[in-house]
Amino acid sequence: MDGNPNGNSYMQVVRFPAGGVEARTFLTYSLSDDPASPHHADYTRAYSAGQWVRLPFSEAQIKADAAYSSITISE
């Protein structure tokens, strides 16, 4: 970024409804600080629109991810 990274860069909100846990997260900075980039202010617009990312929290939700993999390490 511009060499003066101040403020929060990551936010997470967790709530505990009757059915379990719900976690949402958001990076607060955009992918580019270059005004000519198509990614300039992209996350700022997404934040303004309330487009937080819902995180998988339960084991079933995590394993349902197509990119899920597991490695068991033992001594």
Image (cartoon, grey):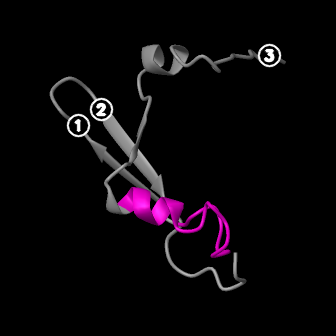
Q: Is residue 35 magenta?
A: yes
Q: State the image coordinates of residue 65 (x, y, percent, origin top left).
A: 55, 19
Left or right, 43 with respect to 17, comes to right
Query: For the residue carrying disc 3, how many other residues have a C-alpha within 10 Å: few (<14), some (14-19), or many (20+)?
Result: few
Q: Nearer the viewer, mark 3 or mark 2?
A: 2
Query: For the residue carrying disc 2, how many other residues have a C-alpha within 10 Å: few (<14), some (14-19), or many (20+)?
Result: few
Vertically, is 59 above or below 28?
Answer: above
Mark closer to the chain start, 3 or 1: 1
Report the Cα–Cα distance between label 3 and label 1.
34 Å
Mark closer to the chain start, 3 or 2: 2
Q: Mark 2 highlights which residue?
A: 21
The image's mark for residue 74 is 3
| Magenta part of the chain | 29-47
Q: State the image coordinates of residue 33 (x, y, percent, origin top left).
A: 64, 74
Quarter location, residue 71: top right
* Residue ID at (56%, 82%): 6
Mark closer to the chain start, 1 or 2: 1
Determine whether the residue tagged by mark 1 lies in a helix, strand or loop.
loop
Left or right, 64 with respect to 57, comes to right
Q: Are the residues at dot 1 and dot 2 in contact (C-beta closer than 8 Å)?
A: yes
Vertically, is 32 above or below 22?
Answer: below
Who is closer to the viewer here, 61 or 20?
A: 61
Badge 2 amino acid: Val
Report the Cα–Cα distance between label 3 and label 2.
30 Å
Q: Mark 1 highlights which residue?
A: 16
Badge 3 amino acid: Ser
* Residue ID at (36%, 40%): 23
Determine whether the residue tagged by mark 3 lies in a helix, strand or loop.
loop
Badge 1 amino acid: Phe
Who is closer to the viewer here, 2 or 22?
A: 2
Quarter location, residue 75: top right
